[in-house]
């Protein structure tokens, strides 16, 4: 449990892209499909909403959801990270988009108000009564009834200790009901509640203390979510969406019968941050390759670029990892660089050879490349644009 699958797809990716000049990004479709099937297995019948921030490639979204970007084989809908992204995807055919974060983008909200298809396809996220006032002003009309979902804080608090991310100010059933009541009064349709337990989904099972915190947190949010839902439903009636979870916490979220859907995205690509979970065996699918430019010593090779540092707290867990050829390592004095990255253990490498890396976080790698090469098991290759390659940058 928690080990990376020992069958590496890199030799196949290496051969399939041999005619291309690196740097390049390549995706093993067999691993992607296996990861998608594993997510569906772990969700145990609960629909999975795909987190687009962890994908950032429309062709991959279509591979998982179908060309209509709606639902297929255990997946249902998209969790978008930007309203402008949601508008773009809806215009391309997506019809079930939950915005994962609040928005204050006035121009995008005005676009939403002007199109009934967009309004019916996108649910906004709110956690503060001020979101209602700002949103209504940006919509520019009282005649539309936007869908909204309430983001309720799912962090664990043990006395003064806060374990989890700093997201929503909503925490208690009373606070959630009050916001639901204000939303209805302001002409919004409350369609759901979200609880994202980042301290479970985003932490690998690295030691017994972490596993204990996860167990305590799962019990606490399970109890509190039930009370929150009762309070909100007393105001709104039935809810269409009760969203929870992430790649690392699907089993915890689906254990609650009131959860109607879970969210996952990183589990499709499986970056290095997901290498040490007990619930599943990772199959890395997305990699990048960059060429050797120089040999400063017999044991060191320096490759082009490579300093694709992931978001989050700075540290070793956020840097890319050289994985093929095996035995390579970053230098502690330089790390992964802006325009060059020296690697130890490189006696066998020559100028022009490729080194393959894994990124620490999933979709963020797509912000570095205009295209991704999708490779089938037979070695055939299809090249598709990332969001960046389509000229889209949503922040």
Image (tube, rainbow, N blue to C red):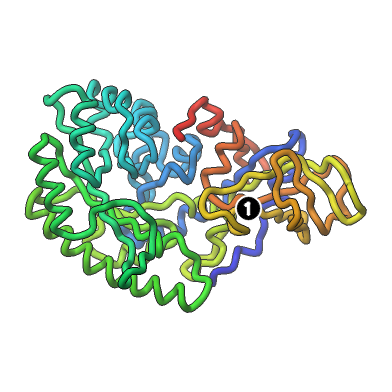
* Residue 207 point in image, percent of width and height: 51, 75
Instruction: Judge whether 75 appears above or below 174 on screen.
Output: above
Q: Tag 1, which secondary structure?
A: loop
Which is nearer the eye, 297 or 61? 297
* Residue 140 point in image, percent of width and height: 19, 22
* Residue 55 point in image, percent of width and height: 49, 43
Residue located 46% across and 59% down the image: 38
Residue located 23% across and 58% down the image: 171
Query: Is 178 on the left or on the right of 54, as rendered?
Result: left
Decide if residue 249 is in sight here: no
Residue located 23% across and 48% down the image: 150
Which is nearer the eye, 50 or 67? 50
Decide if residue 118 is in sight here: yes
Quarter of the figure with residue 17 = top right
Query: Is 155 on the left or on the right of 183, as rendered?
Result: right
Q: Quadrant of the N terminus?
A: bottom right
So how many labels did they put on this image?
1
Residue located 60% across and 44% down the image: 27
Which residue is outermost to the right?
Answer: 298
Instruction: Judge whether 244 appears above or below 251 on screen.
Output: above
Query: Is 60 on the left or on the right of 370, as rendered?
Result: left
Which residue is outermost to the front?
Answer: 160
Specify few, some or many for label 1: CA neighbours under 10 Å numbering under 14, 14-19, or 20 or more. many
| Residue designated by label 1 | 319
Instruction: Judge whether 107 appears above or below 45 on screen.
Output: above
* Residue 4 point in image, percent of width and height: 60, 64
Query: Is 207 on the left or on the right of 25, as rendered?
Result: left
Instruction: Judge whether 215 appears above or below 283 on screen.
Output: below
Which is nearer the eye, 1 or 177? 177
């Amino acid at each position: 449990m928690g080990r990376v699958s020992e069958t590496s797809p890199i030799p196949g990716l290496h051969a399939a892209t041999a005619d291309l000049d690196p740097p390049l990004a390549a995706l093993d479709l067999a691993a992607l499909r296996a990861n998608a099937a594993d997510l569906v297995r772990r969700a145990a019948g609960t629909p999975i909403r795909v987190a687009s921030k962890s994908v950032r490639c429309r062709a991959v979204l279509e591979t998982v959801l179908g060309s209509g970007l709606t639902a297929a084989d255990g997946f249902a809908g998209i969790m978008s990270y930007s309203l402008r992204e949601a508008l773009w995807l809806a215009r391309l055919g997506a019809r079930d988009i939950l915005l994962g974060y609040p928005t204050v983008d006035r121009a995008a909200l005005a676009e939403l108000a002007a199109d009934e298809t967009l309004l019916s396809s996108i649910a906004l996220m709110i956690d503060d009564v001020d979101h209602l006032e700002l949103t209504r002003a940006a919509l520019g009309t009282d005649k539309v009834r936007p869908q909204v979902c309430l983001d309720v804080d799912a962090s664990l608090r043990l006395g003064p200790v806060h374990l989890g991310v700093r997201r929503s100010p909503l925490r208690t059933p009373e606070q959630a009901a009050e916001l639901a009541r204000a939303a209805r009064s302001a002409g919004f349709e409350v369609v759901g509640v979200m609880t994202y337990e980042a301290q479970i989904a985003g932490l690998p099972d690295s030691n017994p203390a972490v596993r204990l915190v996860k167990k305590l947190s799962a019990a606490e949010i399970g109890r509190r979510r039930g009370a929150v839902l009762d309070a909100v439903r007393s105001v709104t009636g039935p809810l269409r969406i009760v969203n929870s979870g992430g790649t690392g916490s699907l089993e915890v979220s689906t254990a609650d019968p009131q959860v109607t859907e879970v969210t996952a995205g990183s589990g499709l690509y499986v970056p290095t941050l997901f290498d040490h979970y007990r619930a599943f065996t990772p199959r890395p699918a997305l990699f990048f390759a960059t060429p050797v430019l120089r040999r400063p010593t017999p044991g060191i090779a320096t490759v082009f670029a490579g300093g694709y540092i992931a978001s989050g707290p700075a540290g070793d867990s956020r840097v890319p990892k050289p994985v093929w050829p095996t035995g390579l390592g970053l230098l502690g004095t330089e790390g992964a660089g802006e325009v060059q990255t020296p690697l130890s253990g490189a006696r066998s490498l020559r100028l022009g050879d490729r080194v393959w890396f894994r990124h620490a976080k999933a979709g963020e790698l797509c912000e570095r490349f205009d295209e991704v090469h999708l490779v089938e098991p037979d070695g055939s290759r299809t090249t598709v644009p990332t969001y960046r390659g389509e000229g889209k940058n949503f922040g």
